[in-house]
């Protein structure tokens, strides 16, 4: 059956700030406590969405979460009015207030793992919401993410949205950032590659400096929930040495599309064996391994070379969507230019300025959730979230009216910021026909 890949990007939230909450993400740590610009962050993301929609790609929007998360702060013992809760948290535990205010849900590559209907035994598109339990500020996202996905992919005849796996270390699940799908036509059954950093029972090959967030047990559970065929499901371990260099997710060291796998030569444990296995399973499989003597792991992490979007062009070639940081690095840009000139499958580079996201440790691929859809499935989802000229104008106007252009950690205690956010999100649910998805609306 004919199908296509749609990208659903996270809209950056009103409390986007730099708190350094993500240990193992070096950009997040490096820019801790710097002032942020939520308005610019949201508009940078919208520009990327609109540009890809204008190029003919199906592009959707996933709304931000409500932040600060007042129910969470109350659960942690802060009490009184909303204003009092914010004041207590700011005085007694500012890091908890930062966590409860994090806009990290904008990186929807971590929202869920997605399997298309062609791969699932019941013929539906399956989503399993990521529990993200390695980081407190992200582990709180799962319930709201599930509500938002169900408001977008709302037809149970075509879509199945599964709640997150149990919130325990054994089932640490980071979503699509550790998942790849290969195949020829999008509508044909494909091969799914689940990448994990550790197993519940230690194998002796785990990172020493930074945590391995994804477990094999979680990946196997997701595959069962999605009713995948075992013979078309592959599991691979991320190289612990590159995790210790800041490769906190697989999408910081590898990206795939159809038969093409663009990865660093140090990405996986037993990488030659993995690539040989994929070669036997996937007709026309093409691995582009970036050698370490051309691009080091450190340079890949700093430029987010692999946290790019690899998109199919109408002529059969592929487009690589990159952050500006990749162009600014002479060695990385030289390699990419040579790659395009080599006549291989990657034939075009497109660069976006995503500085506000990059400073917090997320590039183009972090901001999008890939969903393969048939035309019938596209007709069944909420059409109000699909990007076009009208929606781009509406959302830019919405951002201009509601977002601040400067935010620091101290501003999170401002009750007015909470009120601004609720007013804005209440309006957004109407613009995107979402219904009452936020707790304050119920």
Image (cartoon, helix red, strand yellow):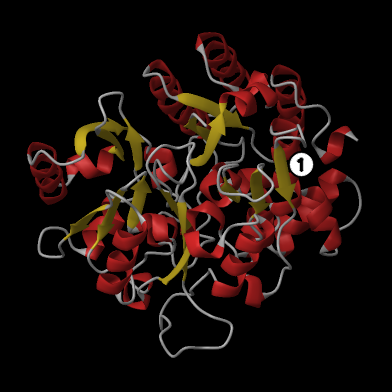
Local secondary structure at mark 1: helix
Q: How many residues crowd mark 1 within 10 Å: few (<14), some (14–19), many (20+)?
A: some
Is residue 135 placed above or below 188 in the rendered structure? below
Q: Is residue 9 visible?
A: no
Would you name the residue on which mark 1 appears? Answer: 147
Residue 284: x, y in percent? 27, 48
In the picture, measured across the screen, residue 64 lies left or right of residue 10, that is: right
Q: Quadrant of the C terminus?
A: top right
In the picture, measured across the screen, residue 276 lies left or right of residue 7, that is: left
Residue 122: x, y in percent? 69, 47
Q: Give the camera-side residue of 238 and 367.
A: 238
Q: Give the camera-side residue of 225 and 121.
A: 121
Q: Give the camera-side residue of 416 and 108.
A: 108
Residue appearing at x 62%, y 49% in the figure: 120
Q: Give the camera-side residue of 353 and 155.
A: 155
Is residue 348 placed above or below 364 in the rendered structure? above
Residue appearing at x 52%, y 88% in the figure: 202
Q: Is residue 368 visible?
A: yes
Where residue 24 sits, quadrant-wise, is bottom left
For this orientation, the residue located farthest to the top is 390
Is residue 309 placed above or below 134 in the rendered structure? above
Residue 433: x, y in percent? 74, 21
Residue 183: x, y in percent? 40, 46
Residue appearing at x 31%, y 62% in the figure: 280
Where residue 355 sits, quadrant-wise, is top left
In the picture, measured across the screen, residue 426 lies left or right of residue 8, that is: right
Instruction: Say how many tags the image has.
Output: 1
């Amino acid at each position: 059956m004919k199908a296509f890949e749609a990208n659903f990007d996270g809209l950056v939230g009103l409390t986007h700030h730099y708190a350094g909450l993500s240990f193992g993400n070096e950009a997040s740590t490096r820019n801790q406590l710097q002032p942020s610009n939520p308005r610019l962050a949201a508009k940078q993301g919208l520009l990327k969405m609109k540009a890809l929609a204008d190029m003919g790609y199906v592009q959707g929007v996933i709304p931000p979460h409500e932040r600060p998360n007042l129910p969470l702060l109350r659960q942690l013992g802060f009490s009184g009015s909303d204003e009092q809760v914010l004041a207590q948290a700011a005085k007694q535990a500012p890091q908890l207030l930062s966590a409860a205010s994090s806009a990290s849900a904008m990186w929807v590559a971590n929202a869920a793992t997605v399997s298309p209907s062609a791969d699932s035994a019941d013929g539906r598109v399956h989503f399993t919401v990521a529990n993200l339990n390695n980081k407190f500020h992200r582990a709180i996202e799962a319930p709201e993410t599930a509500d938002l996905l169900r408001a977008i992919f709302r037809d149970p005849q075509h879509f199945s949205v599964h709640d997150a796996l149990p919130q325990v270390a054994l089932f640490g699940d980071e979503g699509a950032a550790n998942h790849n799908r290969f195949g020829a036509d999008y509508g044909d059954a494909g091969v799914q590659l689940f990448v994990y950093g550790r197993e519940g029972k230690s194998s002796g090959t785990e990172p020493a400096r930074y945590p391995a967030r994804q477990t094999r047990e979680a990946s196997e559970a997701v595959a069962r929930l999605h009713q995948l065929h075992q013979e078309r499901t592959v599991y691979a371990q991320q190289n612990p040495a590159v995790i210790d260099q800041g490769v906190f997710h697989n999408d910081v060291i590898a990206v795939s599309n159809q038969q093409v796998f663009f990865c660093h030569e140090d990405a996986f444990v037993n990488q030659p064996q993995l690539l040989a296995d994929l070669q036997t399973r996937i007709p026309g499989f093409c691995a582009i391994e970036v050698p370490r003597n051309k691009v080091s792991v450190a340079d890949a992490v700093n430029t987010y070379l692999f946290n790019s979007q690899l998109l199919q062009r109408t002529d059969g070639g592929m487009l690589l969507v990159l952050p500006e940081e990749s162009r600014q690095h002479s060695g990385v840009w030289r390699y990419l230019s040579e790659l395009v000139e080599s006549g291989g499958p990657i034939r075009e580079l497109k660069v976006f300025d995503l500085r506000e996201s990059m400073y917090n440790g997320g590039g183009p691929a972090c901001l999008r959730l890939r969903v393969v859809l048939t035309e019938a499935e596209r007709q069944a989802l909420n059409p109000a979230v699909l990007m076009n000229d009208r929606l781009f104008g509406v959302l830019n106007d919405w951002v201009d009216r509601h977002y601040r252009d400067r935010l620091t950690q101290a501003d999170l205690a401002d009750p007015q910021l909470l009120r601004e956010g609720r007013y804005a999100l209440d309006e957004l649910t109407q613009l995107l026909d979402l219904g009452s998805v936020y707790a304050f609306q119920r």
